[in-house]
Amino acid sequence: MINIDIHKRLQSNDGDMNLHVVCHIEEGEFVTLYGKSGAGKTSTLRMLAGLMTPDKGLITVNGETWYDAQNNNSLKPQLRNIGYVFQDYALFPNMTVLDNLKYAQPKSHSPHLLAELIEIIELGDLQFQKPQTLSGGQKQRVALARAVVQEPKLLLLDEPLAALDRTIRIKLQDYLQQLHKKQKLTTILISHDIAEIMKLSDVVFMIDHGKIVKQGNPEDIFVNNSVSGKFKFTGEVLSIKKEDVVFIVTVLIQNQIVKVIAEKSEIDSLTVGDQVLVASKAFNPLLIKI
Amino acid sequence: MDWQPLILTFQLAAVTTIILFILSIPLARWLASSTSKLKPIIETLVSMPLVLPPTVLGFYFLIAFSPGNAFGAWLNDWLSLKLVFSFTGLVLASVIYSLPFMVHPIQSGLSSLPSSLIEASSLMGKSKWKTLFNIQLPNIKASLLTGIVLSFAHTVGEFGVVLMIGGNIPGKTKVASIAIYDEVEALNYAAANFYSIVLFIITFCILLFVYLINGGYIKKFWR
């Protein structure tokens, strides 16, 4: 159980910002921080990891005090046992993939985890390569494996999937989901991708100008509650075309392209690139065994 | 031909370089990461030998370490350390004189590494020293090599400081650069030419070696 109540004065592009984050995270939860860039998401993560010192406040994790401004008490990052995936991956260039993973292992580590991770995240062919020779998606897999091999209680991910293309991204989301459950992690992810958030998280904290403005499960945050559809998917609008009297909206859902018919009134507020919910009520889908 | 001054030169350069290497790593690490108010002052002091005439440094060493002085006498009596006109004194002076040539490359190498590497290592529970030896130093090999070679070459080329504090004692403080000056004064051009050409060739080879390695021409043992 994590309790955070921290203040920090940050310099941002549009002047100073007062970050004040108060939140409560249960053990085993998958939490996403969502918000514009510069809203204070990365700073919050860094303060939780001990890489940045808050101005004042309190952080307790499972009853242990990690930061307490009043008693001038701050636990070193070394002792927090956090798996952290950096935006730039931060793989050690002088070590092979395998050495990167071995370096991250704690002194008393479970003997099978390393081999299991290499298996799950499919690193077998890459393990003797140096990070410079890997593609973005491969680096990302190594960074994720390296954070988990550390056997942390808490896994922090700073927008790790943003730079990847959609198919690799979906695969990595699956890895992440699998590891989160298998290792009983408490995971905090920074993400901009609503589809990704809907898929992965239990709780979303929407951060704006250094404050949590909305929190709840992803559906409550992103989906208009008046829709009680049986089928719901989120996707991105790729194109809007007029055809006779109706409009055809092409939507990318996960990695499938779907065409949806829409009326003029529905189109008015839509532009290409918008995240949308595609829902369908009262219809009878076909089930075909494959 | 007398090889003594050349051997002495390379002995001095080797000892100086080893001491500087050990000394400069913690100093450069501190300079690269510190936010202390003292930092600009220490940085200035480290860089002073770049601009100061060597004779200034030599002069103050001579004054400070002279056994006629309180400090020099104390060193002499208590540690039986004679720093004026001795090899030990030359080493000490060379270490200070070549300090920026070792510290600057290491410092800029360390600052150029992304801070996330160090943060990642500390979140893995590794101490600062373990991070330094396992992550930071192995990733700045080129800077380390540059530092080693520049300080070595710079010590080989030293003249003013050596002359001031070491004098010209054959086998003890008469290094090649001073021997050349000596031979020219005695109109013994053949000997001067011998020392000069050896220094020329050796320093050329050392620097060429560094540029070949750092330029990626020799990849076998590097990267």
Image: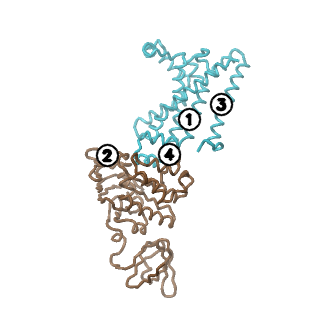
Chain colours: A brown, B cyan
Badge 2 and badge 3 in a common chain: no
Q: Residue furthest front?
A: A111
Query: Can you say whether B64 is above or below A99 in the image?
Result: above
Instruction: Find numbered disc 4 in the image and state the secondary structure of the residue it sits on.
Output: loop
The dot on residue A74 is 2
Instruction: Find numbered disc 3 in the image and state the secondary structure of the residue it sits on.
Output: helix
**Which kind of residue does numbered mark 2 sit on?**
Ser
How far apart marks 3 and 4 lie (CA) works out to 30 Å
Q: Is residue A10 left or right of residue A253?
A: left
Chain ID of residue with mark 1: B
Q: Which residue is mark 3?
A: B203
Q: Position of residue B166 (x, y in %)?
A: 56, 18
**Which kind of residue does numbered mark 3 sit on?**
Thr
Mark sitting earlier along the chain (3/4): 4
Query: Can you say whether A74 is above or below B146 in the image?
Result: below
- Can see residue A147? no
Q: Position of residue A107 (x, y in %)?
A: 40, 45
The dot on residue B147 is 1
Residue at horizontal 47%, vertical 63%?
A172
Give the crowd class for mark 4: few <14, some 14-19, many >=20 residues within 10 Å: some
Q: Position of residue A236 (x, y in %)?
A: 46, 72
**Which kind of residue does numbered mark 1 sit on?**
Gly
Badge 3 and badge 4 in a common chain: yes
Mark sitting earlier along the chain (3/1): 1
Q: Which residue is mark 4?
A: B113
